[in-house]
Amino acid sequence: MRGIPQHTRLLVTRLLDAYCARICPPSARHAVLLGYHLGYDSVVLEEHRRILGIVGTRRAVPVARLRWRASDSVWTLEYADTSGAMRRYRPLPSSRSFLALLREFDADPAGLFWGRIDGKSLRWCRPEGRCGSCEAKYCGVLGTEPAVTEAVGAPRGALTRLGDP
C-alpha cells in the first residue's frame, strides 16, 4: 500500500476536524472557513472563500499540502505560491510526525501560509497576537504547552504564560 495507512487517516481526520473548528469558530464562518481534503497520499488544507462576495457560494483555495511518502514513512509540507503551485516548505522539509508539520503550519514562522488567508484576523484575535484564551485553545488542539512570554507591565525579566493575568 503506497497511500496513507488507514489508522493514520483516521488520526489525521480527527486532528484536522478539531484544528479547523478552532481556526474558524461558528461565529466567524460567514467570513472565512478553513477546511481540508484528504486524498490518497496527501492532505490539502484549504480556505473556502466566497465567490465574488456572494453569500452561500464558496470555492476552495489551497493553502498548504502535507504529502505522505510511503517509501520512508515521512510527511512533507508544501505551501501554495502566488500562482497556486505547491512548493516545498524549506524550513522544515519533512517529518515522521504529521503533528510536527501541522504545528509548523500553525506557527508559520516564515509567513508563507497565513499571510495570504483573508481571515488572518480570525487567527490572531488582536494585533499583538493571540490572546491567552485563543492560545490555550490552539495548544489544546495541537498538544503543546502555551508559550512563555515577558509579561506586559511586569518587572523587566518577569515571565508569564500566555493567558495568565
Image (tube, rainbow, N blue to C red):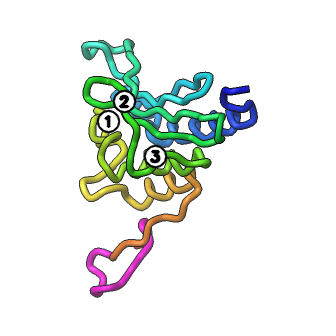
Tag 3 near tag 2, CB within 8 Å: no
Question: For residue 51, which quarter of the picture?
Answer: top left
Please report the bounds of the magenta region as a residue range: 151-162
Instruction: For mark 1, give the secondary structure.
Output: loop
Q: Nearer the viewer, residue 46 or 25?
A: 46
The residue at the point 38 percent across, 16 percent down is 59
Q: Secondary structure at mark 2?
A: loop
Q: Quadrant of the N terminus?
A: top right
Q: Which residue is mark 2?
A: 32
Q: Quadrant of residue 32?
A: top left
Q: Nearer the viewer, mark 3 or mark 1?
A: 3
Q: Are marks 1 and 2 in contact (CB under 8 Å)?
A: yes
Q: Residues within 10 Å of mark 1 (few under 14, many from 20)?
A: many
- Amino acid at dot 1: Gly
Residue 44 place in picture, x, y as percent: 49, 28
Query: Of the residues tagged 3 and 2, which is closer to the observer?
Result: 3
User: Of the numbered discs in the image, which one, if any, rests on residue 119?
Assistant: 1
Q: In this view of the protein, which residue sits in the foreground, 100 or 74? A: 74
Residue where numbered disc 3 is placed? 93
Which amino acid is tagged 2? Val
Label 3 – label 2 distance at C-alpha: 28 Å
Q: CA distance from mark 3 to mark 1?
A: 26 Å
The vertical placement of 36 against 75, above or below, is: above
